[in-house]
Amino acid sequence: MADKKKGRVFSGARPTGRQHLGNYLGAIRNYVALQDDYECIYCIVDLHALTTVETTKDLKANTYEMALDWLAAGIRPEETIVFVQSHVPQVTELHTILSMVTPLGKLTDLPTFKEKVRQQPHNVNYGLVGYPVLMTADITLYKADTVPVGVDQAPHIEFAREVVRSFNYRFGTNVLIEPQMKTTEIPKVLGIYGKDKMSKSLNNHIELAATPEETEKRVMQMVTDPQRIKRTDPGNPDVCNVFTMHKIFSPPEEVEMINVECRRAGIGCVDCKKRFAANLNKHLAPFRARRAELASDPDYIWDVLRDGADRARVIAEKTMEEVRAAVQLP
Ligand code: SF4
């Protein structure tokens, strides 16, 4: 890795398979950009996924598809470490050690834990409670000093910092690094029905790897300004999700034209959506071509993930040697 970088970034995401526009705008785009200034470590956190998944049958395929999308989008495995969490088992050892300096009450008080209990009352497992400790282990095992987060995730990093302080204080060391947050402006990407956040589970998403035809079909289903019933009704782009997307993917002059014409019924929603689908397909064409190229060698992604885990393990084992010494494990 180059040594003139600003620091080391760690970020993890659960293996959710093929990525959608929400994943792209919320995380992947940022992952790609961070590589220019930071040493980056991106992890597919399959162990975290076990706390909530109903079945593990798709775990491997979802890991593969997600890694494929990341690389096709521009993550550069020659410099960035891309790997699967469970391939570096040292993280579970650090998790256990950190759990000894984490008060249980703090974990059960976290709003995210309470939310999960509401979502899956039939499966309030031990892993769910310890999830933030495992996340702290993920970050600190690789001595990452920077974690990119959206504002809503800030409490997680604050929690990780507290755990690090407790560990360092308890064992009179400074082996673990308190990570800093790098808050990024993450646009709220709504699903095609315009109400909820884009999400696979709600089936309101647009996959990056979809064909141009599938993409257009999804775009044509998008909900527009609900007040605009007839083609002759003037619309309000400010409340329209299609317009929000145009602002991200369409050229500025086209955005301006729609902004003006929609308000005086000069453009219909069908035409407006077709334009958006075309611009989106154009934007995603290089990604899709690269994806097909990478997928033509089925071993390539697993080779990248294996190599990433080898490199991650070197850092992890060094940290664990320091941790074991600080804790004075015999
Ligand atoms: Fe939305 Fe475009 Fe229809 Fe206006 S013309 S309401 S911006 S889809």
Image (cartoon, rainbow, N blue to C red):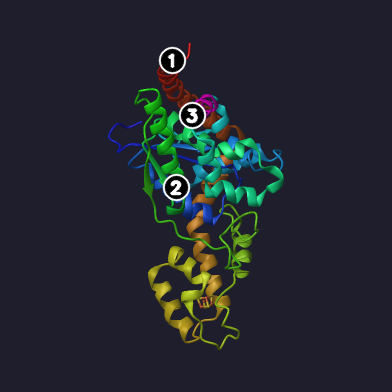
Q: Earlier in the sequence, mark 1 or mark 2?
A: 2
Mark 1, secondary structure of its residue: loop
Relative horizontal placement of residue 248, taking residue 198 as reference (left or right) = left
Q: Residue furthest left?
A: 4
Instruction: Name the residue tied to disc 1.
Output: 328
Instruction: Tell me: is circle 1 under 8 Å from ligand 1.
Output: no
Mark 3, secondary structure of its residue: helix
In the rendered image, residue 100 lying in the magenta stretch gets the answer yes
The residue range painted magenta reads 90-101
What residue appears at the point 29 percent right and 31 percent down from the top-left corner? 3
For the residues labelled 3 and 1, the Cα–Cα distance comes to 14 Å
Which quarter of the figure has residue 166?
A: top left
Mark 2, secondary structure of its residue: helix
The image's mark for residue 98 is 3
Q: Earlier in the sequence, mark 3 or mark 2?
A: 3
| Circle 3: residue type | Leu
Q: Residue furthest bottom?
A: 232
Residue 20 rendering spot, x and y as whole percentages: 56, 54
| Circle 1: residue type | Gln
Q: Earlier in the sequence, mark 3 or mark 1?
A: 3
Residue 50 rendering spot, x and y as whole percentages: 64, 38
What residue appears at the point 49 percent right and 85 percent down from the top-left corner? 266
What residue appears at the point 51 percent right and 82 percent down from the top-left corner? 235
Do the residues bearing badges 3 and 2 touch, measured as CB atoms within 8 Å? no
Residue 248 lies, with reference to residue 23, above or below; the image says below
In the rendered image, residue 2 lying in the magenta stretch gets the answer no
Inspect this view and state whether residue 297 appears: no
For the residues labelled 3 and 2, the Cα–Cα distance comes to 18 Å
Instruction: Name the residue tied to disc 2.
Output: 155
In this rendered view, identify the residue nearer to me: 83 or 142: 142
Residue 176 rendering spot, x and y as whole percentages: 38, 28
